[in-house]
Image (cartoon, rainbow, N blue to C red):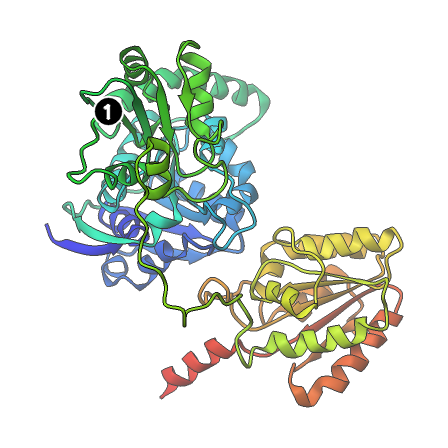
């Protein structure tokens, strides 16, 4: 078959198409976004009738994929690591009902290049008791999609595939497999498995427990996990996913002199790990993420030999793994890369010149100078960069601006203003606004509508252009749902509007509407 030069994200997407995938339902989040975008742009996917959707949030996306699986088809849902928190409910229950034909791709972000935290998705997979795949390179990422669907359908379980930023956004040659046709439409063999009444759930949970030996057997025998022998038994090394590449980079021929257990499939291959422990003097665990494997092996291996890794900070517990950190853990000289020219300086991220959010925040900053006790609660999106303008005081998680403003207002903070984008409002802000309405909170909510989900590259926004009707339908008094075009010429009007709504005791919504400057340029170019 043909060989393509693909990002890790693109390798997964191409494999989904080639492996007979029928539907991909996702919410954009760096570094996972390019998977779904690749499918959406693929001529092959269109010709094969593949459905590709951006959903309101990760929960609705995964639930849609479970519906695809109910129909007997193969589905994929992609998200970043914090998105897995959002869909925790269907994720956990998908494992209990024995969902077949679903791969959940989660892109973790060690070093927090574009995220709020470094959480490791393997803990979620272990908690749900499902098989996990963690490719070490782009070819494995492609091959594992085929394998994952086969394993899912054979053993009756969803599959979690975990990739880090470096694998998602680096390129390598990928050899394709023969294209597989999509599954025919069918009904579940056990229709009751999709009804989680306690009488069914108890039986299904027991079934999930009983499947664990088969999951482990696959990890030992599939070939993705490997025991690579080495002559120097003074040290045994355990690598997970991309960490295997970083180990290889420390040796000219890529061959480590120490025995290595390469882990790319979970549950852990206990037989290989026990063999390694018995043959070496001490262990070094290399993981790009949190000390998941290191914590688990200490629970079943003997306690007489030293185990080094992130727990004892042989490798710092925070931050992305790389070849230099591996070299330091091995006690080898660190190889320094070329220095950046002096002309290159660090530049903090900033809103684009001409961004509509700048004009909105200038009005907010001016008004809030009059209220030293007031606070502006921010949210996740491009507009988070308003912190650098002194415009917002907090950013915690998707949708938190509205509910934090409500809680702070109830404790006496005045004014309490929540700032959220149209995409984030559709993702997880509507329920918070409903709480404000039900509790008659004294808050001003500013929904920055730039007609796009801008921070992740310009995907459609689920709530834009419907904001007035949504807010009115939830119960906001329509006299206090205000629109404005955020431009310099409208600054005084914006200031006056904001002051009027602060003076109103109740729930106010201000909607500044102007298309993202980058997206607008794209649209003008497309028309030409």
Position of 290 relative to 526 (above/below): above
For the image shown, how many numbered marks are present on the structure? 1
Position of 1 relative to 209 (above/below): below
Please name the residue that numbered disc 1 is placed on: 258
Residue 96 in view: no
| Image coordinates for residue 151, horizontal then vertical, percent | 29, 30
The image quarter in which residue 416 lies: bottom right
Residue sitting at x 49%, y 33%: 124
| Image coordinates for residue 252, horizontal then vertical, percent | 17, 40
In the displayed structure, does residue 403 sit left or right of residue 349? Answer: right
**In this view of the protein, which residue sits in the foreground, 21 or 38?**
38
Residue 250 in view: yes
Q: Residue furthest left?
A: 1
Residue sitting at x 55%, y 41%: 85
| Image coordinates for residue 475, horizontal then vertical, percent | 77, 61
Residue sitting at x 41%, y 79%: 522
Position of 122 relative to 3 (above/below): above
In the displayed structure, does residue 353 sit left or right of residue 257? Answer: right
């Amino acid at each position: 078959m043909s060989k393509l030069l693909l990002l890790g994200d693109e390798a997964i997407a191409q494999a989904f198409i080639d492996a007979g995938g029928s539907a991909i339902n996702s919410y954009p989040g760096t570094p996972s976004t390019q998977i779904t975008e690749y499918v959406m742009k693929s001529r092959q996917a269109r010709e094969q009738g593949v459905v590709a959707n951006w959903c309101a949030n990760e929960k609705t996306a995964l639930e849609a994929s479970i519906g695809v699986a109910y129909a007997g088809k193969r589905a994929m849902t992609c998200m970043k690591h914090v998105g897995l928190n959002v869909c925790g409910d269907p994720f956990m229950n998908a494992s209990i009902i024995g969902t077949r034909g679903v791969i959940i791709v989660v892109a973790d972000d060690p070093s927090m290049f574009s995220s709020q935290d470094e959480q490791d998705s393997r803990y979620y997979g272990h908690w749900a008791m499902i098989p996990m795949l963690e490719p070490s390179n782009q070819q494995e990422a492609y091959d594992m999609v085929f394998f994952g669907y086969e394993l899912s359908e054979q053993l009756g379980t969803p599959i979690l595939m975990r990739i880090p930023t470096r694998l998602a956004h680096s390129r390598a040659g990928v050899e394709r497999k023969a294209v597989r046709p999509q599954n025919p439409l069918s009904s579940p063999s056990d229709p009751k498995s999709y009804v989680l009444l306690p009488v069914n759930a108890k039986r299904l949970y027991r079934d999930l427990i009983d499947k664990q030996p088969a999951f482990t057997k696959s990890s030992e025998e599939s070939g993705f996990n490997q025991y690579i022998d080495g002559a120097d038994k003074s040290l045994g090394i355990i690598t997970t996913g991309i960490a295997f590449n970083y180990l290889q980079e420390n040796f000219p021929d890529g061959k480590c002199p120490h025995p290595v257990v390469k882990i790319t499939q979970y549950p852990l291959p206990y037989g290989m790990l026990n063999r390694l422990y018995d043959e070496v003097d001490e262990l070094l665990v290399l993981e790009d993420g949190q000390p998941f494997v290191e914590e688990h092996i200490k629970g079943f291996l003997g306690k007489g030999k030293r185990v080094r890794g992130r727990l004892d900070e042989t490798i710092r517990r925070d931050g992305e793994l790389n070849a230099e950190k591996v070299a330091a853990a091995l006690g080898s000289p660190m190889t320094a890369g070329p220095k950046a020219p002096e002309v290159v300086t660090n530049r903090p991220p900033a809103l684009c010149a001409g961004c509509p959010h700048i004009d909105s925040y200038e009005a907010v900053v001016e008004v809030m100078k009059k209220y030293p006790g007031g606070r502006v609660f921010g949210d996740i999106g491009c507009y988070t960069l308003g912190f650098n303008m002194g415009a917002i005081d907090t950013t915690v998680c998707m949708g938190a601006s509205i509910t934090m403003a409500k809680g702070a207002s109830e404790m006496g903070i005045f004014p309490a203003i929540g700032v959220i984008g149209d995409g984030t409002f559709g993702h997880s802000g509507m329920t918070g606004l409903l709480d404000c309405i039900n509790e008659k909170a004294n808050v001003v909510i500013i929904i920055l509508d730039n007609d796009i989900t801008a921070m992740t590259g310009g995907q459609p926004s689920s709530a834009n252009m419907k904001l007035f009707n949504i807010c009115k339908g939830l119960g906001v008094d329509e006299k206090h749902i205000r629109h404005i075009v955020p431009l310099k010429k409208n600054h005084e009007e914006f200031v006056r509007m904001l002051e009027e709504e602060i003076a109103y005791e109740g729930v106010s919504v201000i909607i500044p509407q102007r298309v993202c400057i980058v997206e607008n340029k794209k649209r003008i170019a497309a028309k030409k």
